[in-house]
Image (cartoon, helix red, strand yellow):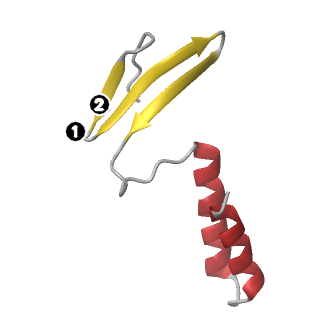
Amino acid sequence: MLALSRKKNEALIINNNVEITILEIKGEQVKIGISAPKEVPVYRKEVYVQIQNANEEAVHTDGNAAGMGALKKMLDK
């Protein structure tokens, strides 16, 4: 893991096409802005984990509609 220090309005670039900017710092909360191409998915980690879990459940179901409904509900958030 790379650990960096950034101040408000400072940014970093990932892979030449993703820019992450520190927008605001209030106490222990940091607001960040992410500029990325539309084809690059950007998720909060907790949402990403939920999607992965729903996908895993869908693979292990017998094809019932409930599993697909749960996946759709997760993606619609």
> Identity of the amino acid at label 1?
Asn
Q: Secondary structure at mark 2?
A: strand
Q: Secondary structure at mark 1?
A: loop
Distance of label 2 from label 1 (alpha carbons): 6 Å
**Where residue 19 sits: x, y (%)?**
34, 33
**Where residue 65 sits: x, y (%)?**
74, 86
> Identity of the amino acid at label 2?
Ile
State the image quarter where residue 52 is shown. bottom right
* Circles 2 and 1 in contact, beta carbons < 8 Å: yes
* Quadrant of the rendering where the N terminus is positioned: top left
Task: Check disc 2: other Cα within 10 Å, few if <14, some if 14-19, many if 20+.
Answer: few
Task: Check disc 1: other Cα within 10 Å, few if <14, some if 14-19, many if 20+.
Answer: few
* Quadrant of the rendering where the C terminus is positioned: bottom right
State the image quarter where residue 54 is shown. bottom right
**In the depicted view, which residue is nearer to us: 15 or 25?**
25
* Vertical side of 70 occupied by 28: above or below: above
**In the depicted view, which residue is nearer to us: 3 or 22?**
22
Q: Which residue is mark 2?
A: 13
**Where residue 35 sits: x, y (%)?**
37, 38
* Vertical side of 71 occupied by 10: above or below: above
The label number, if any, that marks residue 16 in the structure image? 1
